């Protein structure tokens, strides 16, 4: 946040885009009265200058640092404006390329009688492309604003998974899978309580949480311990750590302070009554049958995400069990290590991606920008006899909303 050079570059890019978009705004308002043109220009530049001023002031205003809620909303609105204008500019650029070729044509064929421009040599903008760009950019910005209302719109997704090697005693076992709570982002305790109530209404035999309980610090859970300690299941509640749980994304006064935060976060899991699995496994028994549940620390194959997880510690001793479930926060772990080295892991549960909290999803089509980085990013994936389920996340981080990809509570029934 305090890299002034970075923020100056971003501000410069935004300013260039602002001037570019304003040329189109002037074009679509050219047939209106002078008063209307002036009002449109004033509104446009007041909004643009305010956004730029807020962006420049981000590293220097203490309130933005202490109030995460205010900061996230303001930053999301600024980012929404930027991406809306950037998307609109793509359509304007297509039209400008068209105008450029027509202008070149007017120069090359000026003696042939072909007419590409008006008497002054000007080639007008396409009214259609102008309004199309404005419409699509405005729609994007509007959906981002609307998405603020979706952040607690929990969806229960019911999935039946069939495995040939599942012991008969475990047929019909119900598992609630949740991930990415990110308690540091919450602003509405009552809404979060509603989500926890939905979880309990599923009457699951087992509840599994696959990491990112907090954004950075263990104390982010203080206000929500009395909410999440209501999670109970006959066979227990088990959890793992995600990349955000280690406090890797903030500056600590010392390595000892960072480690202390992690140890205190582990205690939060214990206080909640959750069994935190740290590169280990437990045996789940039902009548005379048993299966293995493995849980590892965060292991990510993408970007700079950490590889704290150790399958070499969690796996030994599970070989004798006919069925195995792995809890691993990052879905990239599946292709990178699980499928290549541990072919008898029947089901892996992950989270991490949040589905980018933005995308399009219906029974026939699923898309999100996050798929450009993650092959498996939301829902069920199968390779041979192995299955991976990626939860879309219970909470949110950064952008305080959801567009298209809603917060998820997964009810898995084994068969």
Image: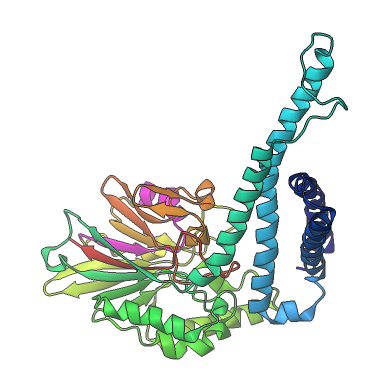
The picture places residue 327, in percent across and down from the top left corner, at 38, 65
In front here: 82 or 33?
33
Q: Using residue 112 as the reference point, say whether residue 343 is left or right of it.
A: left
**Residue 339 visible in the shown view:** yes
Query: Which residue is rendered at x = 23% and y = 70% of the image?
Result: 174
The picture places residue 190, in percent across and down from the top left corner, at 45, 86
Looking at this view, name the residue that lies furthest to the front.
Answer: 33
Magenta stretch in the rendered image = 322-341
Query: Which residue is rendered at x = 83% and y = 54% of the image?
Result: 12
The answer to which quarter of the image holds residue 410 is bottom left
Is 278 within the magenta? no
The picture places residue 78, in percent across and down from the top left corner, at 70, 63
Q: Using residue 166 as the reference point, say whether residue 254 is left or right of it.
A: right
The answer to which quarter of the image holds residue 219 is bottom right
Query: Which residue is rendered at x = 20% and y = 56% of the image?
Result: 162
Query: Which residue is rendered at x = 50% and y = 49% of the image?
Result: 371
In front here: 103 or 363?
103
Looking at this view, name the residue that lies furthest to the top.
Answer: 112
Looking at this view, name the residue that lies furthest to the right.
Answer: 120
């Amino acid at each position: 946040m305090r890299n002034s050079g970075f923020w100056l570059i971003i501000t410069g890019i935004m300013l260039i885009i602002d001037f570019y978009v304003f040329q189109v705004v002037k074009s679509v308002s050219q047939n209106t009265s002078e008063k209307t043109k002036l009002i449109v220009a004033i509104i446009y530049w007041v909004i643009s200058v305010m956004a730029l001023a807020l962006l420049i002031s981000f590293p220097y205003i203490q309130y933005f640092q202490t109030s995460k809620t205010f900061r996230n909303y303001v930053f999301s609105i600024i980012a929404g404006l930027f991406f809306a204008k950037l998307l609109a500019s793509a359509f304007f650029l297509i039209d400008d390329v068209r105008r450029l070729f027509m202008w070149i044509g007017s120069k090359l064929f000026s003696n042939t009688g072909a007419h590409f421009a008006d008497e002054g040599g000007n080639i007008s903008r396409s009214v259609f492309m102008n309004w199309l760009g404005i419409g699509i950019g405005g729609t994007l910005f509007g959906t981002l604003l609307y998405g603020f209302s979706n952040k607690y719109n929990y969806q229960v997704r019911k999935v039946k998974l069939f495995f040939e090697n599942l012991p008969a005693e475990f047929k019909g076992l119900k598992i609630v899978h949740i991930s990415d709570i990110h308690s540091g982002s919450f602003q509405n305790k009552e809404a979060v309580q509603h989500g926890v109530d939905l979880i309990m209404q599923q009457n699951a035999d087992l509840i599994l949480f696959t990491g990112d309980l907090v954004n950075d610090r263990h104390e982010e859970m203080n206000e929500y311990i009395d909410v999440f300690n209501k999670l109970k299941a006959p066979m227990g509640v088990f959890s793992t750590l995600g990349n955000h749980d280690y406090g890797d994304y903030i500056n600590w006064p010392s390595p000892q302070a960072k480690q202390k935060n992690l140890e205190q976060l582990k205690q939060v899991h214990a206080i909640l009554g959750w069994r935190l699995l740290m590169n280990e496994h437990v045996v789940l028994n039902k009548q005379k049958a048993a299966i293995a549940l493995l849980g590892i620390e965060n292991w990510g194959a993408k970007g700079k995400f950490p590889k704290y997880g150790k399958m070499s510690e969690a796996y030994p001793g599970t070989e004798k069990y006919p069925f195995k479930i792995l809890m691993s926060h990052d879905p990239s772990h599946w292709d990178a290590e699980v499928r290549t080295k541990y072919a008898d892991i029947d089901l892996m549960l992950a989270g991490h991606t949040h589905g980018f909290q933005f995308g399009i999803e219906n029974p026939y089509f699923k898309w999100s920008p996050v798929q450009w980085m993650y092959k498996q990013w939301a829902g069920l994936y199968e390779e041979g006899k192995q299955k991976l389920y990626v939860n879309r996340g219970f909470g949110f981080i950064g952008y305080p909303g959801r567009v298209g990809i809603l917060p998820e509570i997964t009810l898995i029934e084994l068969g």
